[in-house]
Amino acid sequence: MANGSTPPTPPLTTEGQRGATITNAYVGREMKAYAVFETEIQTIAFFNTLATIFFSVGAALLSYAIGIWTNLFFVTPPIPAKGEVLADIVAPILCVLAAIFFILGVWALLSKRDVWKGISKLSKP
């Protein structure tokens, strides 16, 4: 200390940076663009609508049949004649109709997939 000045004081804390650090991660992906006609879009939307309707109706019919059998389970004997007809004839018919609607729903989804495969095959990479 030749000149009489005081030496510099060290910092009071030795902590590093505080808070969150944000690092940008730049990513990219290759996008495919398809040339699609309006009629093809309408066809895909139509098959989506059909699939939704068929699966909904099938689920409703199946729930009606299950509801009939559930009610029959809790009825005390003697079972009314209408109840026997519902349980023995109507409920199985509802199950068969539900299966038909589920099959139609799967057909609609497969048809939509075929339309999309045709669009993909005809499009150049």
Image (tube, rainbow, N blue to C red):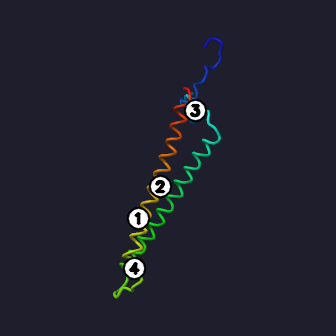
3D distance between C-alphas at marks 3 and 2: 52 Å
| Mark 3 / mark 1, whichever is N-terminal | 3
Up-down relation of residue 14 to residue 64 (above or below)? above
Q: Nearer the viewer, residue 10 or 83?
A: 83
Residue pointed to by mark 3: 22
Mark before the other along the chain sequence, 4 or 3: 3
Q: Residue furthest bottom?
A: 78
Q: CA distance from mark 1 to mark 4?
A: 16 Å
Q: Is residue 24 above or below residue 41?
A: above
Q: Residue 22 location in percent, x, y?
A: 58, 32
| Disc 1 residue type (three-letter) | Val
Q: Can you say which quadrant of the picture contains the N terminus?
A: top right
* Residue appearing at x 63%, y 42% in the figure: 39
Q: How far separated are the C-alphas under marks 4 and 3?
A: 70 Å
Residue located beneath label 1 in the image: 96
- In the rendering, which numbered label is found on residue 85? 4
In this rendering, would 5 be left or right of 121?
Answer: right
Point out residue 95 in the picture as x, y percentages from the top left corner: 41, 66
Earlier sequence position, callout 3 versus callout 2:
3
Q: Position of residue 69 (x, y in %)?
A: 38, 74
